[in-house]
Amino acid sequence: LGFFNAVGTVREAESKLLSQLSDTQNTVIGRHSFGEFVNSDPNEIKFPQIEEEMLTHLQEAVANANYGIEIKTLGIKQLKISKDVSEKVFERMRAERNTKYQATIAQGNAEATKIKAVADSKKTELLAVAEARAKAIQAEGDAEAAKYYKMLEVDPDFAMFLREIDTAKETLKERTTIILREGSWLASLLGQMPNIEPRDPNESKE
């Protein structure tokens, strides 16, 4: 009875409901961005939430109008936008994607520059250490050479003898088996070594 008193006919009821629905649509949809309807990220689409808001808004409007009608459910079946709006929206989406792309490229370039800077720094540090070590070795060699040069000035034969001793030490510092040719410098040097074999205890002492 309330239905017929408020709207009279089914056609009139449909007309009033369409008017209320249009008002609900403009009110609720206006609260949301286009990205909540169309988005490449499914998590950003808010259809269920928007439909729930529209249903609540329409139920309250119809109840306040005393149409004698109860709205049970509401859903968005189709989203229609004009061609001009579509082009502007997709242009904006392309611009946003391009901005994200450029940001990603810039971040990648920054990381690459940072990695190269660290590598260059390590390279410079290692080269400095190697150069310092080379100079130290050269200095040691120069000092060693200077020592022998000084000895050569005072006693050339003795200086050469010490040099041969040092060379022999380096050659024989490990347990090494070597074969010497008669007349080689090392054989001659070993031949000059004093005889340190133990004396026979029965040998008479002088």
Image: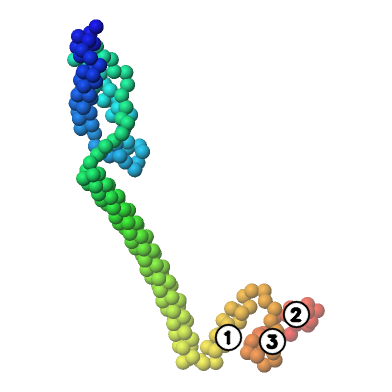
Label 1 to label 2: alpha-carbon separation: 29 Å
Asked which secondary structure carries label 3, the reply is loop
Of 176 and 8, nearer the camera is 8
Q: Give the spatial CA distance, label 1 vs label 3.
A: 15 Å
* SS state under label 1: helix
Name the quadrant containing residue 184: bottom right
| Residue position for label 2 | 199
Q: Is residue 12 visible?
A: yes
Sequence order check, earlier mark of 3 and 2: 3
Which label was assigned to residue 180? 3
Task: Say if 151 sits above or below 92 in the image.
Answer: below
Measured along the vertical axis of the image, is residue 148 above or below residue 173?
Answer: below
- Residue at mark 1: 164
Residues at circles 3 and 2 in contact by the CB criterion of under 8 Å: no
Identify whether 106 is placed above or below 68. Answer: below
Nearer to us of marks 3 and 2 is 3
Judged by depth in the image, the label closer to the viewer, 1 or 3, is 3
Q: Residues within 10 Å of mark 2 (few under 14, many from 20)?
A: few
Quarter of the image where the C terminus is located? bottom right
Tell me the kind of residue under disc 1.
Glu
